[in-house]
Amino acid sequence: MVIQFAAASLVLAVFAAFFETMEVPWTGELILVQAWLVFALSIGAVAITYILIKFNSAFEVGSLFYLVPLVVAVLGYFFFGESLNVYSVMGMGVAVSGVALVTRN
C-alpha cells in the first residue's frame, strides 16, 4: 500500500507542478477532509479490504464493491435529504441480489 501511494504521489506531483498554483488555503475544513480521506478511506478501507481477502476469496470481496453505490445512495437519503425513486430501489435490489448470489455458501 505504501509503495502504491508513493508511486501515485510522485506521478500526481508532476502534474500538479504543471497545472496547479501550488497554493493551499489551510482551513479547518480542509484539514478534517484530508484526515478523513487519509485515515478512513485510504488506510482504513484498504486495510479492511486486505482483512476481508485474508478470510474470503478475492472474488467474493470484489463483488462487495457493487454495494458501494447502494450504500452511498442510502446515506445520501438519510443524511442529505436526497431522493430515491422506484428505479433506484429496483437497482439496489438487483445489486443486492447479485452480491447475495455470489457470496452465498
Image (cartoon, rainbow, N blue to C red):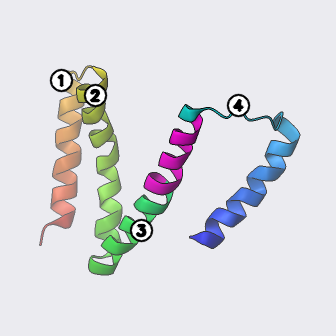
Circle 4: element type: loop
Judge whether residue 36 is colored magenta: yes
Q: Nearer the viewer, residue 103 or 32?
A: 32
Span shown in magenta: 30-41
In the depicted structure, whether residue 40 falls above or below residue 74? below
Question: Which residue has dot 1 on it?
Answer: 86
Of residues 9 and 23, the one nearer the viewer is 23
Question: What amino acid type is highlighted by mark number 4?
Answer: Pro
What residue is at 56 percent from the left and 70 percent from the top?
Answer: 1
Say whether residue 49 is left or right of residue 74. right
Q: Which residue is mark 3?
A: 47
Residue at numbered disc 4: 25
Q: Is residue 20 magenta?
A: no
Using the numbered discs, state the Cα–Cα distance from disc 3 to disc 2 in whole angstroms: 26 Å
> Which quadrant of the rendered structure holds the C terminus?
bottom left
Around disc 3, counting alpha carbons within 10 Å, would you say few (fewer than 14), some (14 to 19), or many (20 or more)?
some
Dividing the picture into quadrants, the one containing residue 9 is bottom right
Report the label total: 4
Label of residue 79 in the image: 2
Residue extending farthest to the right is 18
Q: Position of residue 76 (x, y in %)?
A: 31, 29
Q: Position of residue 90 (x, y in %)?
A: 18, 33
Judge depth for marks 1 and 4 and give the one in front: 4
Marks 1/2: CA distance?
19 Å
Give how far across and how far down residue 80 sits, in percent.
31, 23
Amino acid at circle 2? Phe
Which secondary structure, mark 3?
helix
Q: Nearer the viewer, mark 3 or mark 1?
A: 3
Name the residue: 34% across, 41% down. Answer: 69
> Which of the two labelled residues, at mark 3 and mark 2, occupies the earlier sequence position?
3
Front position among marks 3 and 4: 4
